Image (cartoon, helix red, strand yellow):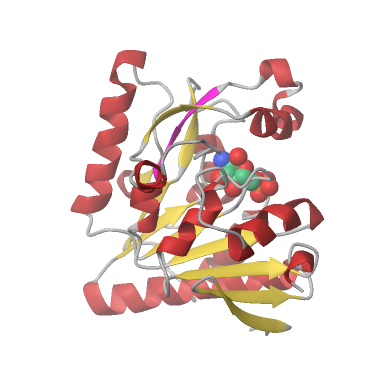
């Protein structure tokens, strides 16, 4: 396993800094594979919360490679994705359902009824009910062994965007329908072919169910994430930077960074 160049303890989290993005992703995939093997060995199943975006693609590639080599199986794994645009058809290439099929579900032995993504086609008036049901599915499955996260440039996790809510309220946010933040819309414009074409709402797993995971692995790669990373790990816990709310889960959070994303950490 590619060793981290530096290991720090910050804000109750373990922070591993790697020389480059490829090493960070390889380490992350090996950590996830270890969690799957341990949980399946102990309880007969593993339950993962998964993320999308550019960051996890090499992680999924490595998990697929382990599966193809006969070293890892998803037969006893359930997954719950963090978010989905709303409304969106699952066959839209920008849907996270399509992303997950492309990068993981369509390439490993996971059962279709164990690979869960929030449904971008539910009626508007039932979106909150669907979101609440997703939280019940996770709880009924025994909770998440590991939640994988990326981070937005504005510090969002999933699509939990910056807010000025009171801290207690922000920590208890459930899975729900949200409006995307302007920075998120700007960042998604490349995928949708322009800002005006970005689907402006999304379903997101809430802060509370993320924080309830037995372990949380958050990846941040590249200089564009450095400011959000520095604030999340060295600043106060604030709903204006949702990743800082991970400070409320001391001992359960691991950050994996490349050198560029870690440059503000001294
Ligand atoms: C999207 C996703 C997030 C993800 C973030 C960062 O907004 N909803 O879950 O962490 O983008 O994406 P990237 O990894 O492409 O920088």
The relative height of residue 125 versus residue 259 in the rendered view (above or below) is: above
Q: Residue 125 is drawn in which quadrant?
A: top left
In this view, the residue in front, 143 or 263, is: 263
Query: Measured from the top left, where is residue 41 in percent x and y?
Result: 29, 79
Residue 53 showing in the rendered view: no
At horizontal 73% and vertical 29% (from top left) the residue drawn is 186
**In which of the image's four quarters is ligand 1 placed?**
top right
Query: Measured from the top left, where is residue 45 in percent x and y?
Result: 28, 66
Query: Measured from the top left, where is residue 159 in percent x and y?
Result: 52, 38
Determine the main secondary structure of the stretch shown in magenta: strand
Q: Is residue 249 left or right of residue 148?
A: left
Q: Residue 229 is drawn in which quadrant?
A: bottom right
In this picture, which residue range is highlighted in magenta?
A: 201-206
Quadrant for the N terminus, please.
bottom right
Q: Residue 14 is drawn in which quadrant?
A: bottom right
Quadrant for the C terminus, please.
bottom right
In this view, the residue in front, 195 or 117, is: 195
At horizontal 41% and vertical 62% (from top left) the residue drawn is 248
Q: Is residue 204 rendered magenta in the image? A: yes
The relative height of residue 102 versus residue 60 in the rendered view (above or below) is: above
In this view, the residue in front, 130 or 266, is: 266
The relative height of residue 124 versus residue 187 in the rendered view (above or below) is: above
Query: Measured from the top left, where is residue 252 in percent x and y?
Result: 42, 71
Count of marks, rendered view: 0
Residue 43 showing in the rendered view: yes
The relative height of residue 203 versus residue 236 in the rendered view (above or below) is: above
Q: Is residue 8 rendered magenta in the image? A: no
């Amino acid at each position: 396993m590619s060793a981290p160049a530096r290991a720090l303890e910050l804000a109750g989290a373990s922070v591993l800094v790697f020389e480059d993005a490829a090493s960070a992703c390889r380490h992350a995939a090996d950590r996830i594979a270890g969690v799957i093997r341990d949980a399946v060995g102990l309880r007969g199943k593993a339950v993962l919360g998964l993320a999308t975006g550019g960051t996890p693609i090499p992680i999924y590639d490595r998990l697929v490679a382990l599966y193809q080599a006969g070293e890892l199986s998803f037969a006893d794994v359930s997954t719950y994705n963090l978010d989905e645009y709303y409304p969106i058809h699952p066959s839209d290439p920008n849907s996270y359902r399509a992303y997950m099929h492309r990068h993981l579900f369509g390439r490993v032995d996971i059962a279709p009824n164990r690979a869960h993504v929030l449904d971008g086609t539910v009626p508007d008036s039932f979106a909150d009910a669907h979101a609440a049901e997703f939280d019940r599915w996770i709880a009924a499955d025994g909770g998440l062994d590991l939640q994988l996260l990326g981070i937005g440039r504005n510090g969002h996790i999933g699509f939990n965007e910056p807010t000025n809510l009171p801290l207690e309220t922000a920590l208890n946010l459930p899975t729900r329908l949200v409006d995307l933040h302007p920075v998120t819309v700007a960042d998604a414009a490349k995928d949708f072919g322009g800002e005006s074409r970005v689907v402006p709402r999304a379903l997101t797993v809430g802060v509370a169910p993320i924080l309830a995971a037995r372990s949380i692995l958050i990846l941040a790669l590249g200089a564009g994430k450095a400011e959000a990373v520095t604030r999340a790990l060295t600043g106060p816990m604030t709903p204006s930077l949702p990743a800082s709310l991970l400070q409320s889960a001391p001992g359960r959070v691991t950050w994996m960074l490349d050198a560029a994303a870690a440059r503000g950490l001294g």
